[in-house]
Amino acid sequence: MQTSPRPDRSWWSDAVCYQVYIRSFADSDADGVGDLGGILSRLGYLELLGVDALWITPCYRSPMVDHGYDITDPRDIDPMFGDLASFDALVAASHEHGIRVILDLVPNHTSNQHGWFRAALGAAPGSPERSRYHFRYGRGADGSQPPNNWPSQFGGPAWTRIVEPHGRPGQWYLHLFAPAQPDLNWEHPEVRADLEKTLRFWLDRGVDGFRIDVAHGIAKPDGLPDGEPGGFALTEGGSGPDARFDHDQVHEVHRMIRSVTDEYRDRVLIGEIWVSDDDRFGRYLRPDELHLGFNFRLTTAPFDAAEIRAAIEHSLAAVAAVGAPPTWTLSNHDVARPVTRFGGGPNGSARARALALVELGLPGVVFVYNGEELGLPSAELPDEALRDPVWERSGRTRRGRDAHRIPLPWEGGPPGYGFTDAGPSWLPIPNDWVGLTVEAQLEDTASTLSLYRHALQLRRSHPGFVGGSLEWYGAPAGCCAYRRTGTTFVCALNTSAEPVPLPPGEVLLCSGRLTDDGRLPPGTAVWLA
Ligand code: GLC
Ligand code: MG
């Protein structure tokens, strides 16, 4: 492992972290599903891209109802992805490449196939086995109505009624996600003790940190009261208070996770925090809680300079009070890819490139979701190809997240694109992605991959990328521009319909091409110094 050039700062304070959605990154054993061996075989690419760390989505033992976010054993690798030996080999090789490894921790729920849940089903109401989850009697004379009005994120109620061991319908259990993902009761000491064990298990194996799934939802309010009927955020990006999330007791869980992690050197904790209030968001990053929190404002901001500037200002404000580094995310495995969100086609792709430059110029931690560096769009899939539980759970009214999880096209063409030697991959790669492969983009200086490589290289080496703060420039309508404080580095974005003059400075990098008379065209961003 290389030593940090700035020992006074944590390695993650301005890191570029690459999200590997393991099923879709690279397949080494020809079963059509990505795996640990696939990541190992592509470390050279990741080094070339210039990332500091990988966040690998869950690779533990799982029936894969929610593609790994439903876990039966958090201290083992699912055979679909490899084994503990291949995991250790990946960590060691990543470190040799100067790349850290962050795992995805899922403390909110287990799989319904987990030994604890099976024991709960076989035990009586009120038993110690049931108390590790949230079992309740239903409402109505015969208990046939769910215990409260909470919806599941994936559609339908957040409760499922079970058949008791004596054979008749009985209690209900809580699942904020699929019925195959029962929520754990975090008041239970064994639940806590088990997570401590899991943390140490992976920290001892040398992982550099954890991304914490549903970090804002782990603690439940006393009595599980009803929420305001209109107050549930069912899609990512929903805002406002939601009865199911962000309860004060959750911070105790994060303090525990932090205290265990602090026994090890240089390990980072990143929370998935869908909380829109800046002050409440910042609470997760107090000095004895998580180091970083995903701020998702840029995943929902429209392509509008004022909105993008507001998203950035909010993200900075949310962490300023607690002194944590800001984080930036344009997409992940749960949300639409920027190219598609911005209208698709050449326009969508130009806008996604522009926003990428705006993001990569900012102080703090950047998360790049695999495929974002290739400018992949979300793909349209036929009904029969859909695999996300959201599709069935929503009564086929929401198509779910498969479109954003298509395997990476590495080289060649359909069906496998070098992602897999199997025939088709677990989600089909569109036939018209031949021009989007890594192979096609590597040597093309105008490609999105080249833009990312260039930007990441400048971010690492140019003296403008220092310090934690920025200042906004005056800019024409539909534009915004910031300067990194104390430097000459400026990033300008044009979301208006007309070309605009450039701010002073020499052009370092442009997301598109300047006009012949040297102005910044619509849908374009530029770096100057
Ligand atoms: C998080 C994950 C998402 C998963 C859910 C339930 O939001 O990012 O993919 O479905 O948690 O674990
Ligand atoms: Mg495989």
Image (cartoon, helix red, strand yellow):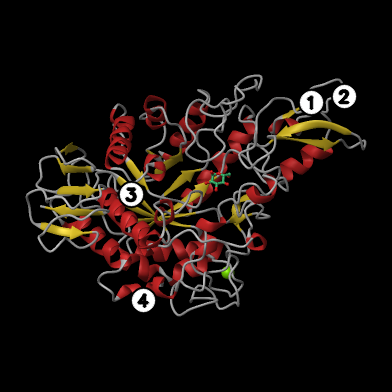
Residue at numbered disc 1: 138
Label 1 secondary element:
loop
Can you see residue 99? no
Instruction: Identify residue type, mark 1.
Output: Gly
Residue at numbered disc 3: 366
Label 2 secondary element:
loop
Pair 4/1: label in front: 4
Marks 2 and 1, how far apart in space? 8 Å
What residue do we see at 59% from left, 36% from top?
193
Image-quarter location of ligand 2: bottom right
Pair 3/4: label in front: 4
**Viewer-side residue, 115 vs 381:** 381
Residue at numbered disc 2: 142
Instruction: Kindly indicate whether the residue at mark 1 contacts the one at mark 2 (C-beta within 8 angstroms).
Output: yes
Answer with mark 2 or mark 4, whichever residue precedes in sequence: 2
What residue do we see at 24% from left, 55% from top?
524
Instruction: Identify residue type, mark 2.
Output: Asp
Image quadrant assignment for residue 132: top right
Instruction: Identify residue type, mark 3.
Output: Val
Instruction: Kindly indicate whether the residue at mark 1 contacts the one at mark 3 (C-beta within 8 angstroms).
Output: no
Q: In the image, is 80 to the left or to the right of 322?
A: right
**Vertical side of 4 occupied by 278: above or below:** above
Answer with mark 3 or mark 1, whichever residue precedes in sequence: 1
User: Within 10 Å of the Cα at label 3, are there few (<14), some (14-19), or many (20+) other Cα atoms?
Assistant: many
Residue at numbered disc 4: 440
Relative image position of residue 365 (x, y in whole percent): 31, 46
